[in-house]
Amino acid sequence: MGTPDFAVPSLELLLSSGYQVVAVVTAPDKPRGRGQKFSPTPVKEVALRHHLPVLQPESLKEPAFVRQLDSYQCEIIVVVAFRILPREVFTLARVGAFNLHASLLPRFRGAAPINWAIIRGEKETGVSTFLLEDRVDTGGILLQSRIPIGPDDDAGTLHDNLAQLGAQVVLETVRLLERGSANPRPQDDTHATPAPKIFKEDCRIHWDHPAEQVRDFIRGLSPYPAAHALYQGKLLKIYRSHLTATQSTSRPGEIHSAPGFLHVATSSYDIAIDEIQQEGKKKMGVEEFLRGFRFHSGKGFE
């Protein structure tokens, strides 16, 4: 059970390792792009290439869907980046149902663990597999694997690294359950931290924070949904930046620009912007962007 690109390596590795995937459950096709044509999910595309049955219920509680899933008599349900399963679904698996989560649980429980790990300045994260229970992201941990967060990682690069690492952990977890040697470890709720879904209004940059926090915020939201700032009513998305050794003497958010050069003051040091996009236009390196966009001296982000 899965929908986006993050789930694809897990499905492909299970198939290449000789496991019989009796069915794939994914989200319904949705209209995408300028033409609003209905497109399959990334997981569905893989399933169709391997001629696997695909189920796309609107509701996971539909009696017809539950009956159809039950008819497969599956031993294990593997969940990677899918929806919250009702009890009548996750209890259908004879051996068990488990989920892959992109954090070292109980840290960063929620919908956006990759983004929040970078935003919070973590130097390490990882993946966890855990047994499904009624409360989201709280089940007993089966396996975990760690990975460093590099200083230049953003949510995109970390997503791809964790998807590959996660596939290996999914395979190891299936083998563990197959052997009957799983020993789930309870999560310590006192160490739990939230990783809630991120909305557009959450993505505005607060220049009055220290430079390192601002840069982590930009990295944690790049390439999607992207951190943004307002300049004279125009929304600018910022994808890449780096720290400078210049201590900020201007008010936070004030801009210093020259050809190929865009620095913004924070509460500590200036941040240098490397990649930026005006809403409705293409993403550009700062040098190219400044050829067509002018910042006025002494002005700053709103």
Image (cartoon, rainbow, N blue to C red):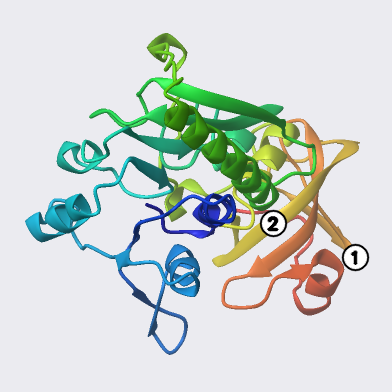
Can residue 181 be seen here?
yes
Q: Nearer the viewer, residue 103 or 7?
A: 7
**55 sits to left or right of 60:** right
| Residue 115 x, y percent position in the rendering | 56, 42
Q: How many marks?
A: 2
Can residue 225 be seen here?
no
Q: Amino acid at mark 2?
A: Tyr
| Residue 244 x, y percent position in the rendering | 88, 40
Q: Amino acid at mark 1?
A: Gly
State whether residue 235 is above or below residue 112. Answer: below
Q: Which mark is residue 260?
A: 1
Distance from label 1 to label 2 (Cα)? 16 Å
**41 sits to left or right of 171:** left
Helix or strand or loop: what does disc 2 sit on? strand
State whether residue 119 is above or below residue 143. Answer: below
Helix or strand or loop: what does disc 1 sit on? loop
Crowd tier of the residue under label 2, counting other residues whose Cα lies within 10 Å: few below 14, some 14–19, many 20 or above = many
State whether residue 11 is above or below residue 110. Answer: below
Q: Which mark is residue 76?
A: none
Q: Nearer the viewer, residue 234 or 181?
A: 181
